[in-house]
Amino acid sequence: MQSDYKKVYEAWQNDPEAFWREAAEPLFWFKPPETIFSAKDGVYGRWFAGAETNTCYNCIDRHVAAGRGAQRALIFDSAMTGEKRFFSFDQLLEEVQAIAAVLQNLGVGKGDRVVIYMPMVPEAIFSMLACARLGAIHSVVFGGFAAHELATRLDDSQAKVVISASCGLEPGRVVPYKPLLDQAVDMAKVKPDCCLVLQRDQLHAALRYEHGDMDFAQAVEVEKVKGTAVACVPVAATDPLYVLYTSGTTGQPKGVVRDNGGHMVALYWSMRNIYGVLPGETFWAASDIGWVVGHSYIVYGPLLAGNATVVFEGKPVGTPDAGTYWRIIQDYDVKSMFTAPTAFRAIRRDDPQGDLIRRYDLSGFRALFLAGERADSETIKWAEQQLNVPVIDHWWQTETGWPVAANPAGLGFLPVKYGSPACPMPGYTVEVVDDAGHPVAAGTLGNIVIKLPLPPGCLVSFWNADERFRSTCLEEFPGYYKTADAGLIDEDGYIFVMARTDDIINCAGHRLSTGAMEEVCAMHPDVAECAVIGVADALKGQIPCGFLVLKHRVERDPRLISREVIDLVRTEIGPVAAFKAVMIVERLPKTRSGKILRGTMQKIADGMPWNMPATIDDPAILDEIRDILRENGYAGNPTMLSA
């Protein structure tokens, strides 16, 4: 198939305002946009200034009004409990209106903040949409986040109401949420007026009525019985839809602000043109609503485009096995899926021959998208061979809200270059510069930057912190947004994202990419996943240190595997890499979204003080890393700072 990518990208380059005006036309506006981009507003300009809309209306009411109310909108599947629930757009409207009525009764209105601290259950998605319906600003905090982290977000957002649940479910354990919420409210300087608590069968929580606690289900049921209708509140396109605090923050949290108008236009455009799904088809982002992927592609993107979206409570392996994803795809006729490379590395580790894949009918499945962590070529090739569909690595950030670079299924695929998320999408001018801000030659490693203005859908600022946004993201390279990613652009315009700029190793004057070394390590047939960090060295400044997780049922001598991996890196990258330290580990420390905590590992190796990452999935893994570093002669004995 001939790709339309070049034609579409050039159309955007030639007339950006006409491009986004056309993209906005299918959506509903109370006051249609006249000014597409206003350069004088906001930190770097604002999209659709003067227009009025409502994101919830475009996600639900617009489809009901068009006669598609009976169409399936949301599928809930819990691998933890076996529960399955299905909601049409009509039913979604009923649920969202009832929650909006409850919030309205509590005094929540346009511009008020609501913190949502919930597991992956439908009520969490309904609550996000109910906030959008009222023009309130939601801030989703990953369920089970530490009390201190939640308290800082309550204070920063000055939330009027918290919507939570009694517990979350992890394989083999129930995670009580209410005690963490109670501690956070007690610690917070700004107390919410009320906490709505969804009681789950697995654990009922004691409500503190004197603190304004309410039973979520009871309050919502009252409004359902009454049949309360709540109209969508018109909001300015430039008004905030949500604040999402970035992972791993300490001290003053950093809240990414997303607006209503630009956000919905960009996501609506991306569903058809990047992900290639049509209205009525099922799309699945296997993520969590606590992360930007969940906001963009579990909730808003699919519903704006009229797709059915899957809300999944479970893990890629262990609930019950590495075939869970294939069951979901088969049972709900998923056409396109989005998940993290970490999930596929776990599946590949447990089922290296793909035996579980062949138990399911995946004939309707068209494409797999990977993002969130660098996708190594070996994992992509394995997935391609096993699934026999395009496997697409694409790149974006919490700050951008939707893909910066991708191989667009809807526009027609570009030739694949392993290790690259392909080319920039319309809206993004991506360049690579040196530390002084000068452009570098094609193929040269440097700082990846995006020319201002950022397109619709990207962050407009940090919550109540414009100056912090400027100093953090815009000042180092004037006229550009600093992605804090390092990489290169080749002669064909393909982007290669190699590492975070903090992960570039300076070894004896040579700038080396940890991502490039990880790519080579992953080529070894016994390696399931890996991480490379730079550790301090008196002679060379830094040297690379590799951590390897082996595939299950590997019986060869780990020392031999380590030697082979070292030789492989020496062959593929050269002696300049100085790659000599390799350690075999059972698992790698990760955030709950699957990102490897390389920075924390590096601090442990160098004996530097460090904070326990707020988003870590299992803190015990860091003890394992410390122990193996000690065994191999590294410092491994740092001080962990208090939170």
Image (spheres, grey):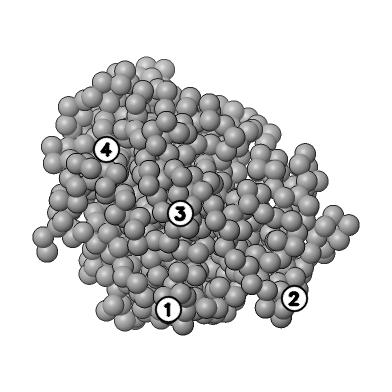
Identity of the residue drawn at 42% across and 78% down: 68
Label 4 and label 1: CA atoms lie apart by 37 Å
Q: Which residue is mark 1?
A: 68
The amino acid type of the residue labelled 1 equals Arg
Report the residue marked by disc 2: 222
Q: Nearer the viewer, mark 4 or mark 2?
A: 2
**Quadrant hosting residue 308:** bottom left
Q: Which mark is residue 57?
A: none
Q: Which residue is mark 3?
A: 31
In terms of sequence position, does the residue under pointer 4 or pointer 1 come before the other?
1
Q: CA distance from mark 4 to mark 2?
A: 51 Å
**Type of residue at label 2?**
Val
Q: Position of residue 407 (x, y in %)?
A: 24, 54
The residue at which mark 4 appears reads as 429
Q: Earlier in the sequence, mark 4 or mark 3?
A: 3
Residue located at (67% from left, 78% from top)? 227
Q: Earlier in the sequence, mark 4 or mark 2?
A: 2
Instruction: Determine crowd level at label 1: few under 14, some 14-19, many 20+ residues with C-alpha closer than 10 A.
Output: some
